[in-house]
Each structure stands twice: as C-alpha cells, then as structure tokens.
Amino acid sequence: SNLDPRRVGAQGLDFAEALREEKERLEAARDALWGRRGDAAEFLGWIDVPEDTEAVRNVLRYRQANAWVEDFVVLGIGGSALGAQAVSAALGKGPVRLHFVDNVEPEPILELLRALDPRKTLVNVISKSGSTAETMAAFLAFRRWLEDALGAGWKEHVAVTTDPARGILRPYAQAEGLAAFEVPPAVGGRFSVTCPVGTLPLAFVGVDLEAFLAGCRKANETAQAGAEANLPAQTALVHDRLSRKGLNVNVFMPYSTRLRYLPDWFVQLHDESLGKAVNRAGEEVRTGTTAVRAIGTTDQHAQVQLFREGPHDKLITLVRLEEATEDLEIPAVAGLEALDYLFGRSFFELLSAEAKATAHALAKAQQPNFAFVLERLDAYTLGWLMQHLMWQTAFLGELWGIDAFNQPGVELGKEYTYALMGRKGYEPLAEELKAEGVE
Ligand code: PA5
C-alpha cells in the first residue's frame, strides 16, 4: 500500500509534516488500544482472534464432516453478514452456493425457500445477541421449513453462531443439540469477520482461512509500529486531518467487481463505529464522517463527475491490484481500427490504467485520494486489508475520543419496532408511539 503525498496533499495537507506533528498523539492512541485489549469490556478481542488457530480448526473439522452441503444459508444482518459476504464474493469457489438472508422482505425469502432443497441445505443462524428481530424471524421461518421437510432431521441442518453465554440462542442450541460456534464476548459484530461469524461460511466456499488470518496478523504487526511505519495510524491521520478541514465524506472505491461488497462492509464498519453523539467523557461531540460506496471502473461513469466537480467535502480511498489472477487479451477486429489502442492489450492493463488515470484526475481537481495497492487479490491480502481497516477505525475512535465499539444510536429504532410488533414489556412505548401518530 502507498500513501502518495501528492494525492492526499491535494487539499493542502502536508502529510509528512502532519505525521511529525501528530507522532505523539498517534503513538498514544496505539498504546491505548494495545493496552486495553485484555479487557473484554473494551471490545478489542478482534485484535487477538486471528491468533486463535483452534477456532479455525474447529470450523474446518465441521466443514469436512458436512460434505453433503450444497447450499449454505447465512441468516444474519450487519456485522453478522457483511464480512463473509465481502470475502466470499471476492474469493469464494464452488460447488457450495452461499446465500445471505439479511433483510425481512418476504418475496426474496420466499424465492430462496422455493429454490432450495432442504436435504442439501445448511442454515447458519448468526447473531451475537440472539435478539435481532430480522435474524430471529428468518430463523423461525427456516427452522419450520426444515422441520416440515426433514422432521427431527432438521437439527443436522442448522449451525448456530452466537455469544458463548449471553442471549437465547446458546441455551436453545444446547437444548436441541445443534452445532454451535462462538462469537467471542470481546468481539463486536462489525469486527467479527475473523471469528466463526465469517470463517464458518467462508470455509464452505473454500476460502483459504489460514492465509486470510495470516494477512490479519500482518496488519496487527504493522499496527504495533512507531508512527512512521504504522500504516493504520497514518491512514487514520489522513482521515482525521481532512475531516477537520471539512472533508466529511469518505468514498471507498475498489477497482474490482470481485470486491463489490467490500465497500458495504467498510461503510458499516466506519459509520456505525465513528458516528457518535458523545465522547468517552460523556460530552456531546457529534463525530463521524459519512462513508460512501463506489466501484471502479463502473462508477467513473456515475459518481466521478461529482467527485471531480462537486463540493470539496470528500476523501477518496481507492483499492487497486498490481496483478490479475487471470487475464484476458482484447482482440483486434478488422473494421474497428479506431479501437486499435486496445488491440492486443489486456483487460487488466485497461483496468489498471483507468484506476491510475482516475486517481490522478481527481488529484488534479484538488480531490484528495490515496490507494491501497494490493499485490494481487487473495486471502492473505484481503485479510490484511480488512484487519487494517479495523485498525484504522479503532485509531480514529481514539483520535476522536469516542467509543468506536458501541452503537447506542441504533437502539431506539429497535425498541420502537418491538413496540409496534407488540412485544411484551413494550406497551408503554407502543402507547407513546400511538400518541405520536405512529402505529
Ligand atoms: O456491528 C454490529 O454490532 C451490528 O451491526 C451487529 O452485527 C448487528 O446489529 C447484528 O447483531 P447480532 O449479531 O447481535 O444479531
């Protein structure tokens, strides 16, 4: 990866000078994060998870014991789905088909249920809390569907991934004798791709989990370095400095269709972690910048117009690859000589040229951007990038003095939903909503 000062400097940020000025603050943030990691209440367990080889072996044993699976259905939402979705789209291989049910719109659920064969389907319900209405509703439906088709055999077709102690799913799995995997208590949803939340579905689509976690460990190593070599501290610094100059939109733009779900994962990680009303001291601060997804080259023909000529309120993070996994030559065709600049070149050459050209054109428009340049797209580099982005988020939380690991802002909506759905104990809230015209 590189931090090209010409590009991030497009809005007058002298990166080298900022790094000198902020060295102490960055290293204090690093020390605070590493120092708090033993405390489960701090939710820094994601730092250590890639070291836990026993959890991966457990997942791989389960995968081997269930060779019959043809369709693997993830029932989960937010952090319980987006990581596996991002990695499987990039690296997943058949023959097992992976499906994600992360919404409660009935039509797509019915379409999936009608398409699947219950005898060949494994349903993985993933909920750390075990209380998320969307996931639990899906579980109720899929459990009934399995039982209707398989009778008592439904139990062999369900794997539960949840907290080892809290919530209703763990005792339920125990009572029914279901296969169960742990979300470590100190790991929050959006930081959970390296634990069985991500690794179990990914094992079924053949992702090299050892390499994925080795990439994460590499990012951990870099996150221990002094500020001059600490890349997550540095990318956090760029975000911090530019947001203080009013650049409050963070565009995350991989040049890869295989990475098409990575921005969704990043948007959740960034926005849910860093959009906070109060700081750790309880003072109102209203922090946060808004992450936005884009895909290159596709969105060069859409959002790039805005990125070059719209308001100067953005930092753009590009992801590009140095090498294709497989390439395709663009053939010469008689009668279309106007296209001869493409003849004999490869698709990957064109993709790379477009990524570099766009980055430079953005810088020319005073639009700051930097690129993560991955040698190639594989389990190691993707593990590295995802763990780096988790570190970047954690560093920003420290720099902004907020708790990046909670999400109090999503609670009220959940409680209103319970009230509207008639959950016991929420009657007063239902009355309040009625009085306010919501029913
Ligand atoms: O990052 C988070 O904590 C959230 O996005 C959760 O992952 C999401 O709300 C799902 O929660 P749970 O796994 O408890 O069902």
Image (cartoon, grey):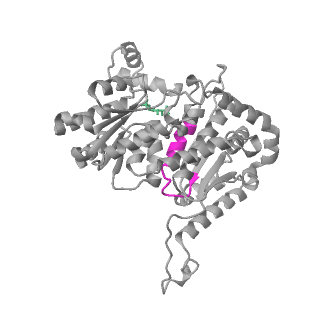
Q: Which residues are magenta?
A: 253-271
Horizontal relation, residue 127 to residue 47: left or right: left
Horizontal relation, residue 256 to residue 423: left or right: right
Tell which of 433 and 47 is nearer to you. 47
Residue 257 inside the magenta-drawn segment:
yes
Can you see residue 240?
yes
Residue 375 inside the magenta-drawn segment:
no
Look at 51% across and 37% down and name the residue there.
52
- Dividing the picture into quadrants, the one containing residue 350 is bottom right
Can you see residue 78?
no
Horizontal relation, residue 134 to residue 119: left or right: right
- Dividing the picture into quadrants, the one containing residue 179 is top left
Horizontal relation, residue 28 to residue 416: left or right: right
Q: Give the total of numbered labels.
A: 0
As drawn, 422 above or below 30: above
Q: Position of residue 301 (x, y in %)?
A: 54, 60
Look at 54% across and 84% down and name the residue there.
337
As drawn, 188 above or below 346: above
Q: Position of residue 243 (x, y in %)?
A: 69, 39
Look at 47% across and 54% down and name the residue there.
90
As drawn, 264 above or below 279: below
Tell which of 19 and 224 is nearer to you. 224
Tell which of 150 and 365 is nearer to you. 150
Q: Position of residue 393 (x, y in %)?
A: 62, 37
Q: Position of residue 403 (x, y in %)?
A: 61, 27
Say which quadrant the C terminus sits in. Answer: top left
